[in-house]
């Protein structure tokens, strides 16, 4: 039965992408089938093979070690503030982002990350046939972040047509930044975070290949990556430390605002209608949760978590998931966890449009115009990933 629902879910997701396609006749079916098969194989490999589990454990151990190192710095500055036995979210989950941001900066400085991004992007392009620029961008988005990635391709930003720009933005919104992966791993199981990272790259191309199909002229398929201005090693360290701190503070501010707002809205809805806002959203999103493979008995609560991510962000949704995870089966927990690992939410429209506008005003206006369609596609990517995982759980 679970396979029947998974197939139904896959068909529905692809159909929802198809009905908003810019050019239905130009959709290339074969690469889409290849990428779906690769997604299933990847999910199976990572979640059900000994080698896959070893890789995930290794990945998790690395981030656990990084979080421990980060905690040394946090404890030095903030030690004694927390009550004994308590672990404030800001100190244990958000501030370690600063240290991970520094490591990314070092790897960028010594030219290791650009090499990795180009290499994986080359392989991804052979499979997806979406273009060198698009493939590089998909990988770079997962490493440097949804706004910072556009800095690396700013040489070409003004020359990119709207259809290719949509694909770049869709990749940025459909993935997550490596700097906050460690924070996710403190809230949901690392194996689902790692699985989602891989599925996001292919899922973004699958959905954008349907919504926004096009063929790249080989003569125009040139990748020009911007090299950062030459800095000393310690200048770079200072910049990435401050960048990481800004991310931590920004996420903290978003959490304060969104959690407080949702609590207020829940109270108002409960007083007026006798049902909380999240419960209402849960009923609306429950059919989507069901086609992702969530049992109907758990679909309303799961739908509420999914909706929370869409209207606020993944951090708020993950904190809510942690509170009620005991109410879900392990299979549902895996499906929802994979769904949550992406930047697909309303605030990301402003973040991406603002990042592009800061580099090229005209292109920023283009992004703002297709913002809702961008979110629609990125949300379908998250749903698709949940469906793919339901095949193997």
Image: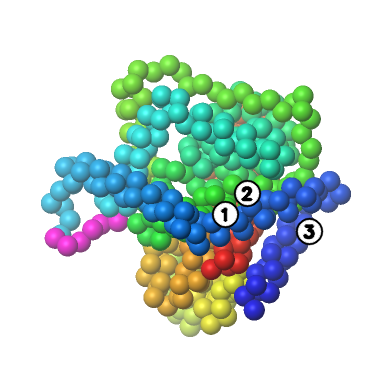
**Residue neighbourhood size for the residue with mark 3, other residues' Cα within 10 Å, grouped as few (<14), some (14–19), many (≥20):** few
Q: CA distance from mark 2 to mark 3?
A: 20 Å
Q: CA distance from mark 1 to mark 3?
A: 28 Å
Examine the rendered structure and indicate whether residue 148 appears above or below residue 326.
Answer: above
Quarter of the picture containing the N terminus is bottom right
Task: Say which of 72 and 359 sits in front.
Answer: 72
- Asked if marks 2 and 1 touch (Cβ < 8 Å), the reply is yes
Task: Provide the secondary structure element on which disc 3 rests.
Answer: loop
Provide the residue span drawn in magenta: 84-90
The number of numbered badges drawn on the structure is: 3
**Residue neighbourhood size for the residue with mark 2, other residues' Cα within 10 Å, grouped as few (<14), some (14–19), many (≥20):** many
Question: Along the polypeptide, which appears first: circle 2 or circle 1?
Answer: 1
Rendered residue at 30%/56% (across/down): 89
Q: CA distance from mark 2 to mark 1?
A: 10 Å
Examine the rendered structure and indicate whether residue 274 appears above or below residue 41.
Answer: below
Q: Which residue is mark 1?
A: 42
Rendered residue at 62%/23% (across/down): 224
Q: Which residue is mark 3?
A: 19
Q: Is residue 94 left or right of residue 127?
A: left
- The part of the image, by quadrant, that contains residue 161 is top right
Rendered residue at 46%/54% (across/down): 51
Relative image position of residue 229 (x, y in whole percent): 46, 18
Dominant secondary structure, magenta:
loop
Q: Is residue 180 magenta?
A: no
Q: Which residue is mark 2?
A: 202
Relative image position of residue 384 (x, y in whole percent): 63, 60
Residue located farthest toward the front when viewing the structure as drawn: 50
Relative image position of residue 344 (x, y in whole percent): 56, 53
């Amino acid at each position: 039965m679970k396979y029947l629902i998974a197939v139904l879910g896959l068909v529905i997701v692809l159909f929802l992408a198809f009905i908003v396609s810019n050019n239905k006749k130009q959709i290339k079916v074969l690469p889409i089938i290849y990428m779906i098969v690769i997604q299933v194989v990847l999910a199976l490999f990572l979640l059900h093979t000994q080698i896959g589990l070893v890789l995930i454990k290794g990945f998790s151990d690395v981030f656990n070690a990084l979080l421990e190192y980060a905690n040394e710095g946090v404890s030095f500055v903030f030690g004694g503030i927390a009550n004994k036995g308590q672990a404030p979210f800001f100190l244990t989950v958000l501030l370690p982002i600063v240290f991970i941001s520094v490591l990314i900066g070092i790897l960028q400085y010594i030219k290791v990350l650009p090499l990795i991004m180009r290499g994986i992007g080359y392989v991804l392009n052979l499979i997806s046939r979406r273009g060198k620029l698009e493939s590089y961008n998909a990988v770079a988005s997962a490493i440097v972040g949804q706004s910072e990635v556009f800095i690396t391709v700013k040489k070409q930003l003004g020359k990119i047509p709207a259809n290719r720009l949509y694909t770049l933005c869709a990749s940025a919104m459909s993935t997550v930044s490596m700097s906050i992966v460690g924070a996710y791993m403190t809230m949901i199981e690392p194996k689902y975070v790692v699985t989602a990272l891989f599925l996001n790259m292919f899922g973004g191309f699958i959905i954008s290949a349907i919504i926004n199909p096009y063929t790249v002229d080989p003569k125009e398929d040139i990748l020009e990556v911007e090299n950062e201005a030459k800095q000393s090693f310690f200048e770079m360290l200072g910049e990435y430390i401050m960048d990481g701190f800004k991310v931590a503070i920004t996420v903290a501010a978003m959490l304060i605002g969104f959690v407080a707002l949702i609590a207020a809205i829940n109270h108002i809805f409960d007083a007026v209608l006798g049902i909380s806002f999240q419960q209402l959203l849960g009923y609306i999103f429950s059919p989507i949760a069901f086609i992702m493979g969530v049992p109907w008995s758990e679909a309303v609560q799961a739908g509420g978590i999914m909706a929370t991510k869409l209207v606020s962000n993944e951090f708020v949704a993950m904190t809510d998931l942690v509170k009620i995870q005991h109410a879900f089966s392990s299979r549902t927990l895996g499906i929802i966890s994979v769904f949550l690992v992406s930047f697909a939410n309303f605030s990301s429209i402003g973040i991406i449009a603002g990042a592009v506008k800061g580099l090229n005003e005209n292109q920023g206006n283009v992004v703002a115009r297709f913002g809702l369609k961008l979110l629609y596609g990125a949300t379908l990517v998250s749903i698709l990933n949940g469906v793919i995982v339901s095949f193997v759980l």
